[in-house]
Image: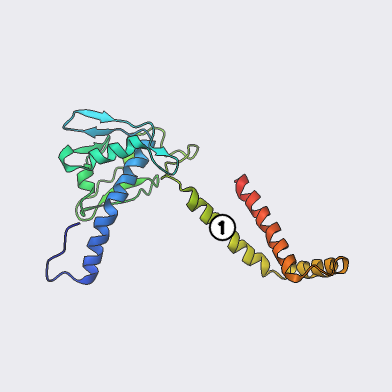
Amino acid sequence: MGKITHKNVSIDEAITLTLITMASPIAVKKYLAYWFQLGKKLIITNQDKAIMLTKVLNGDRFSKEFEECWQIVSNPETGDCYLQGTHQTIQDLLSPKWEITSCARCEMPVPMIEIGVQDLSCVCDDLDNWPNNELPPPREPVSNQQQLSEIRQSLRAKLNQKANKPSLKAEITENNSNNQKKNPQIDDRYLKQLVIRQITEAELKRHCKK
């Protein structure tokens, strides 16, 4: 990452330039991965060939083939590389002049120039089968740990909501009273843990069905 040496650059401008430099490769990599998943080819001008990957994802990471392809096309020494049907090269998109945003028509990542004339066409213009709500949309690698974390957060939120409901509090109180009559050794803490466990198991089953 280049250093900002101009004396008149403000702190806010420096932060903005740093964020653009850091985010650009990630956004461009996602842009490439998404369009590969729809069958787009990547043209490498100097080698006079087109690359089309059939495997882009591998579980919670990008496939080895995609990572190798990315190392080639993101290297300036490779020369001009661009997605079929576009004219912006990968090196163009990696510069601060461009940003990756969502297409208003199909919600796929598309390039947008910061300053200049914007091409109104979308990368999907030459794809007959897109947009298509019946097909699964392209995606990024999914982390199992992230999924579990999201499920845990969802469960905590739902448990807190249910625990604050008057009907549930009344049910816990009634169960507590009935069980203590049957078994005086059962205390409130045990009953609370039992109810929470029952709610958690129900919510987990619901998540598994989705």
98 and 74: which is toward the camera: 74
180 and 74: which is toward the camera: 180
Q: Does residue 79 appear in this view?
A: no
Q: Residue furthest front?
A: 185
88 and 44: which is toward the camera: 44
Say which quadrant the N terminus sits in: bottom left
Residue at 24% of width from left, 61% of height from top? Answer: 18
| Quarter holding residue 53 | top left
Residue at 18% of width from left, 37% of height from top? Answer: 78
Q: Residue furthest top?
A: 49
> Left of 150 or right of it: where is 108?
left
> Left of 86 or right of it: where is 127?
right
Q: Position of residue 198 (x, y in %)?
A: 71, 57
Residue at 44% of width from left, 44% of height from top? Answer: 60
| Quarter holding residue 178 | bottom right
Q: Position of residue 187 (x, y in %)?
A: 77, 70
Above or below, 98 against 136 in this view is below
Q: Does residue 134 appear in this view?
A: yes
Residue at 12% of width from left, 67% of height from top? Answer: 6
Task: Give the secondary structure at mark 1.
Answer: helix
Above or below, 190 against 198 in this view is below
**What residue does disc 1 label?**
152
Q: Position of residue 34 (x, y in %)?
A: 37, 41
